Amino acid sequence: MKLSTFLQLDLPAMLAALFATLACALIGNFLVLRRQSLMGDAVSHAVLPGIVIAFLIWGSRATWPVFIGAAAAALTAVVLIELVRRYGRLDAGTAMAVVFSIMFAAGVVMMEQAAARNIDLDAECVLYGQLEDIIWLAPTTLASLLDPAVWEELPREVWTLFGAFVFTSVVVTLFWKELKLASFDPALASALGFPAGRIDLALMFVVGIVAVAAFEAVGSILVIAMFICPAASARLLTDRLSTQVAISLVLAAISAIAGYLLAAFGPMWFGHEHSLAASGMIAVVSGVILAVSVVAAPRYGLLARRFRPEAASAGTAAAVRE
Amino acid sequence: MMLAALDSMDWPGLARVATVLALGGGYNTSLVMIGVAVLGFASGIVGTFAVLRKRAMMSDTLSHATLPGIGLAFLAAVALGVEGRSLPVLLAGAGLAGIAGVGAVHVMSRHTRLPEDAAMGAVLSVFFGLGFVLLSYIQTLGTGAEGGIAKFIYGQTAAMSEADAIVIAIVASLVVASVVLLFKEFRLLCFDPDFATAQGWPVGRIDLALMGLVVIVTVIGLQAVGLILVIAMIVIPAAAARFWTEKLARMTIVAGLFGAGSGYVGAALSALMPRFPAGGVIVLVAGAVFLFSLVFAPRRGVLSGFVRHALLSLDIETQHVLRRAYEAGEAARAPGSVAEAVRAVEIDSLSITRSWSPPRRAVVLLSLAARGFVSRRGGEVRLTSDGLDEARRVTRNHRLWEAFLISHADLTPSHVHRSADLVEHVLDPDLVSRLEDELRRGGKLPLTNEPMASAHPC
């Protein structure tokens, strides 16, 4: 493998994956704590019709129309889920399943219509993204990475995801106290004037933005995995929120880089010449990390619980400390 | 642009639609319609319990989790030299992976501190990611089989063969039979799992049996609607049926019929119109049924809720007017009886009616007149004798309730008026007579005939 190939093909894809996983994992911590994980799932399915409509109207894959279409669909989904839950008197899970599956079905049907008119759009890329298609022609040698002009040509997907990560970091830093309070003691948060419902809505807004920014490059499946797996693993490893967030970011970065490398170069070690799906592999790596945490986490893992039941119960009592 | 697209489509004529719906659209189309209808019936029935048990998203998790099973089954079959695309092999793999997914969620949510929704989301995305990696590997094998496997993601209804339809029919019948056999157990599981546990029912195992049935329905639904939308076949008909009845047996049957109908009509529409993929159309038909039920169902529907609410508020408004009229008559201290004074009150001049907007006043007055409680005499709206009786009854209810709250509910008089205002309108005659007994025993019954003592000055 030549270095220039790595720099031009693998590096930008890895950067895109890295920023996507970091942004998702960061906000995912609060999704997991607020028990809203499945909203990430529902929202990332429900963006499909918005994307297709944007395609049909603008007839191109330009970033902004797609972004607007997806964001509008995400917002519609959140509102519809709430309406169905309230006026239909159904539980949240049923309301989610009803709304997102209908929206997804509408997207699938519209996509066929778009395909009829030779608009290049397939459902696969929405689910799996197109990480492998991100190409950065500018760098040719390691030394060229020091040249600002080279960075200016960084593909827009990478910039979008970098922006999403920065946006998420800013929001989380600014509202750290509110998010923490709403995550651990929603009643107190409401009493202090930060209604948990409104914080959830704001959370959904950020989740929607991150999901929309990330899905085009990495696909909705990876977005869901990254919302949940790193944060859930970190939750099993610590009781402190700040530590949990830090661990989740490290695990997300490990998943992104290890997953990408495994997908791109793993098959070669076994004598295959084709690479595997990178976004899927990153999800798998994050899943393996979660599985290891579930089994072997020092305090909350299955093994620790089995052999030191008193530690586990003591831990539960300490769980909301901080 | 989208409208233009719709214009340029060939819309099938009504006669053609009727022919296809009557199974006259050719052997294959009819086969697919019947196959999907049977599938919809079974999934609606199983879905009833999945929805009532709040397992909708669990079903979603499970259907996503089948993908790696399909990939692994294909690879295993190829390694063993069997035809990798054979449906039973792939579906067996799907089933096993679905069960593994349920197991993983169970372990994480029961035995670690992770909440169930995080466990479901993790399993859903990681399993699906693994399935996608396997698919990308199978693609590199160059066997040309990837199309056959990828169809499970979005479904390929039109490819249903007679053998497939027979498999679906047999499995669906077994699923329905299991639900009938386990009906009592499932009912307990959905409505009172704690009671069931206390009675010694193996709740965990019943739960697993339900999830097992969901896995089976998912697996036979994969080919028809695809693994992302099979959740819709399970959840939407059941959620729609919930609006129409409060009885479990009836809801189960309604859900089955909704599922069957959506499948039947959806498959027919998809066959009639090119480029309308069956999986999506079936779900959209089910979605239309859901939307209709949500809005128009007689008791639990949104519209009936609005109408009921509007009628109740109108009732409350009219009762307020009647009571205010009565109180005004009492306060007037005119010579003669209170009854005459009350009947002499001009409804239009009551402060409560004057504070309303003209349309609102018109509606309330119309409602009073329609019930014969007021009539226009000499240019002024006044109570009729029926209206007087009703006003007396309403005022009496109000004061009974106030007196009850003061003497029995330990509320201070200053707080009573508001809550009496809220509740008095819904007192039924039975409760009124019990309140009367209660208060009579304490010697606190407001007098029936005039002068009616007010429990406190309003």
Image (cartoon, helix red, strand yellow):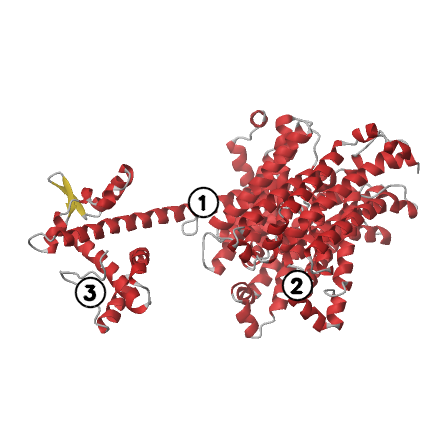
Q: Please state, as top left, top right, bottom left or bottom right, where the C terminus of chain A lies in the image.
A: bottom right
| Amino acid type for the residue under numbered disc 2 | Ala
- Mark number for residue B446? 3
Mark 3 vs mark 2, CA separation in Å? 58 Å
Q: Is residue B419 left or right of residue B23?
A: left
Instruction: From the image, tell me which residue sits under label 1.
Output: B295
Residue type for callout 3: Pro
Quadrant in which the N terminus of chain A is drawn: top right
Report whether B275 appears left or right of A90: right
Q: Does residue A288 sit above or below A299 in this rendering?
A: above
Q: Is residue B423 visible?
A: yes
Q: Residue furthest left?
A: B335
| Badges 3 and 2, same chain | no
Can you identify the residue that label 2 sits on? A319
The mark closer to the camera, 1 or 2, is: 2
Q: Earlier in the sequence, mark 1 or mark 3?
A: 1
Q: Quadrant of residue B20?
A: top right
The circle drawn on residue B404 is none
Query: Closer to the camera, A114 or B8?
Result: A114
Q: In this image, A302 relative to A101: left or right?
A: right
Depth check, front residue: A163 or B92: A163
SS class, disc 2: loop
Mark 2 closeness class: few <14, some 14–19, many ≥20 residues within 10 Å: some
Q: Nearer the viewer, mark 3 or mark 2?
A: 2
Q: What's the chain of the residue with tag 1?
A: B
Q: Position of residue B378 (x, y in %)?
A: 10, 39
* Marks 1,3: beta carbons within 8 A: no
